[in-house]
Image (cartoon, rainbow, N blue to C red):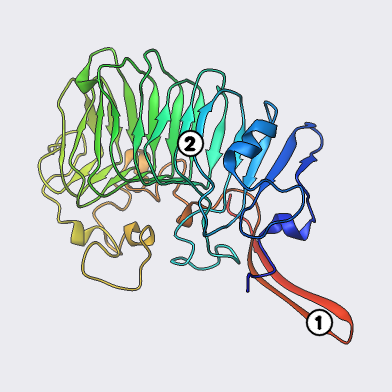
Amino acid sequence: MKPIYTNIAIILVFAGCMTTWPAMATICRVNNYIINPGVYTTSMAAYTAALPGDTLSFESSPIAYGALSNINKKLVLIGPGYFLNDNPETQALKYPATIGYISFQQGSEGSQIVGMVMSATSYVNTSNLTLRRNFFQGGVQFDNDGLYAIVFQGNAIEGNVVGTNNIVSGIIFQNNIFGAQSNVRIADGLASCTFNFENNVFGPFFQTVNVSNSQFFNNIMTNGSFGQNNNVFTNNIGNGTQFGNQAANQQNVNPESVFACYASCSGFSPDGRWALKPGSPASCAGVSGTDCGIFGGTYPYVLSGLPDIPAIYYFTLFNNSNTLNVSLKVKSHN
């Protein structure tokens, strides 16, 4: 039997798209697991119905919602997060909201995507986008020239981040986890491309970063290499000599001494393992005394990619003497 709860939207008895105040934008519910009248069951159906400025609210489901291809209008996409079974007090229903991929095209400038899972390679082909607290299982690809003002913040990224021979600049990667078999290879080091890498962790299977004229600070690298294409390295930590030992960088640091759970340990989530252990060489080792790694800096990583809206993490519903009783616990994740 399917559970009778889903997330905060069902408590408010939303149906289909509802108008919000004061912006007069619309929130469109998307749910293919607990189906109600007026609720969209595929990502493309909700996208087709939405107007620029609207929000697509994807609810927890074990069933994928399908790809979102050729997005050409400004939208906000919100999901419940990921690794929901692995961290405490996440969501009452532990399924993520998974789409095959997303493809941002011209016209979608100003869009945001938060708390979603993309199982295939996603495409970022326009500027002025914010991608926060998502799980990019298939990596990200840039196909257009002239892209700028794109922020990747607090994501888990597997697969490659690539954009060979395309001119992009002002791309920011803050507090992300770069995981299994990842490469960051954008424009193969063209001088016209610039990036900012701040407070990221590059995991044990990471391979290489190849960009130019870019800044790297407060990052921790446990494997792989960085290109020396006129990049600036400050307050980073490497398991080898990736950053050297000048400008407050640390080299040849054993990751086991840095993280709460680097390799052979239990009791930690896939993202919680990257917390710093007591006495870590990354503690207060960043710019202005912040911690290196994903939990330091201006935008600390949020476990499970929970969106910055209230989340119901405990919910019970029972009938007692013809009285409907509801018990719930809610937590914010700013």
Query: Is 20 placed left or right of 168 in the picture?
Result: right
Q: Position of residue 37 (x, y in %)?
A: 77, 52
Q: Residue at x 68, y 28 (%)?
A: 53
Q: Residue at x 70, y 70 (%)?
A: 328
Nearer to the camera, 99 or 136:
99
Counting every numbered tag in the picture gives 2
Please state, as top left, top right, bottom left or bottom right, where the N terminus lies in the image.
bottom right
In this view, which residue lies farthest toward the bottom? 321
Q: Amino acid at mark 1?
A: Asn
Residue 319, label in figure: 1
- The residue beneath circle 2 is 131
Q: Residue at x 28, y 37 (%)?
A: 160
Q: Position of residue 151 (x, y in %)?
A: 45, 31
Crowding at mark 2 (Cα within 10 Å: few <14, some 14-19, many 20+)? some
Query: Is 51 placed left or right of 277 in the picture?
Result: right
Q: Position of residue 79 (x, y in %)?
A: 57, 48
Q: Secondary structure at mark 1?
A: strand
Query: Is 233 placed left or right of 294 in the picture?
Result: left
Q: Secondary structure at mark 2?
A: strand
